[in-house]
Amino acid sequence: MTTFVDRVELHVAAGNGGHGCASVHREKFKPLGGPDGGNGGRGGDVILTVDQSVTTLLDYHHSPHRKATNGKPGEGGNRSGKDGQDLVLPVPDGTVVLDGAGNVLADLVGHGTSYVAAQGGRGGLGNAALASARRKAPGFALLGEPGDLQDIHLELKTVADVALVGYPSAGKSSLISVLSAAKPKIADYPFTTLVPNLGVVTAGSTVYTVADVPGLIPGASQGKGLGLEFLRHVERCSVLVHVLDTATLESERDPLSDLDVIEAELSEYGGLDRRPRIVVLNKIDVPDGKDLAEMVRPDLEARGYRVFEVSAVAHMGLKELSFALAELVAGARAARPKEEATRIVIRPKAVDDAGFTVTREEDVFRVRGEKPERWVRQTDFNNDEAVGYLADRLNRLGVEERLMKAGARHGDGVAIGPEDNAVVFDWEPSMSAGAEMLGRRGEDHRFEEPRPAAQRRRDREAERDDAQQEFDGFEPF
């Protein structure tokens, strides 16, 4: 049964925003007390957060679909809907978040580091929030926006100071078990280690972590054996330790050829050339192993490697090795650039940035921009007043003027939004005039200030005169 997973595809869906409410306050002796529809609640976000207690992505391998809760709709009486609850997904330290194209979206290192993988939709405004001096009684509310839908890939890259590299059964698991308190599975057959093992080592005042990860074979950088599943966990390590088997029973292998193969795979994978390296000749407790270690040590030192002869079984040479690793780790930590204080970068928009674009395509003029597309998503197209409100907003933004400059004519198709999810309508050049004529939409004359009696009398007389003229001009059949 699978117990360790370091790469998964995750489908996350943020919560949708709740719809706004269109309501009019009513009470005894005051049937029209004004709009009192509340706003909809915000949809919940999907957040990835580093948790030190999590060491694998196994949960997401079994359950790759995750969704946050939706916001609640607004209600009458100026009651706003409840916000959706954020969905927090714990991930191991060293998790990399990528999109479908392989682009890195976030690199989560350090306990508590978080990333919003999918953002919840905004709640729609109720008619109380839409009321103004010109629009005293809106008969509509805005719809809540849908939450983000994302397909992301999570990759785990082990965070450790030292990586033990070498052939299967070279003794890496035994070595980490005696250097630290880690208890990996140990056996004398290839690929005993199928998952990365981490151990904490204390040498003097330096505390560092050592990673024992699955062994390499020729062609690992192309995916043979455990291949990339191993190499991915070496990227973050500051020091590489070649663990060479001096007591191998395979006649075609020896420490020098093993080292050449491992170095070739590391070079082929890339990005690891400048990591400091040391060589550990393991299993010197075996007589033949001790002799072979003494034979190859001069060649290894001639190549520039620091060489340590150890025996994980007999606990020989471990103290010198642990302090040498502590020295290299301390040097690597000191060489790292100090983290700078967080800076906020302000990038103001250009003065001529309208916030949207209009492009001419084969059969339509396409409008793209955050505001126009968001307004379309918030519009209830079954409500004529809401559609008129959308027209007003687009007109004030300058969409009509930009369409005219782009060459749009009466009856041309206009699409707002991306090609696969756009609202298409036939453009009317008189939209501007219509917006001005309908600028008082949403008003109710019952909310207007009472007119003087003389003015009401003159208005009634004018209405009677108009009606009489219309009757006088009527011709019977």
Image (spheres, grey):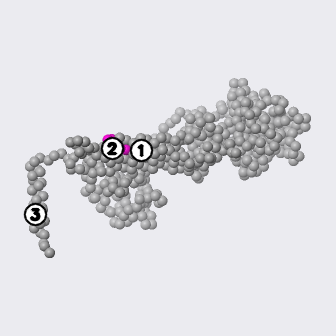
Measure how far apart labels 3 and 2 are at the Cα level.
45 Å
The percent coordinates of residue 270 (x first, y second) are 69, 47
Look at the picture and state if 434 lies above or below 153. Answer: below
Q: Between disc 1 and disc 3, whose residue precedes?
A: 1
> Of tags 1 and 3, which is closer to the observer?
1
**Magenta-highlighted residues:** 74-78
The residue at the point 69 percent across, 28 percent down is: 207
Q: Secondary structure at mark 2?
A: loop
Which of 405/423 is in front? 423
> Residue 333 vs residue 419: left or right?
right
Look at the picture and state if 436 lies above or below 2. Answer: below
The residue under label 1 is which amino acid type?
Lys
Q: Check disc 1: other Cα within 10 Å, few if <14, some if 14-19, many if 20+.
A: many
Return the residue at label 3: 468
Q: Check disc 3: other Cα within 10 Å, few if <14, some if 14-19, many if 20+.
A: few
Return the residue at label 1: 72
Measure how far apart labels 2 and 1 are at the Cα level.
13 Å
In the image, is residue 123 part of the stretch drawn in magenta?
no
What's the mark number on residue 150?
Answer: none
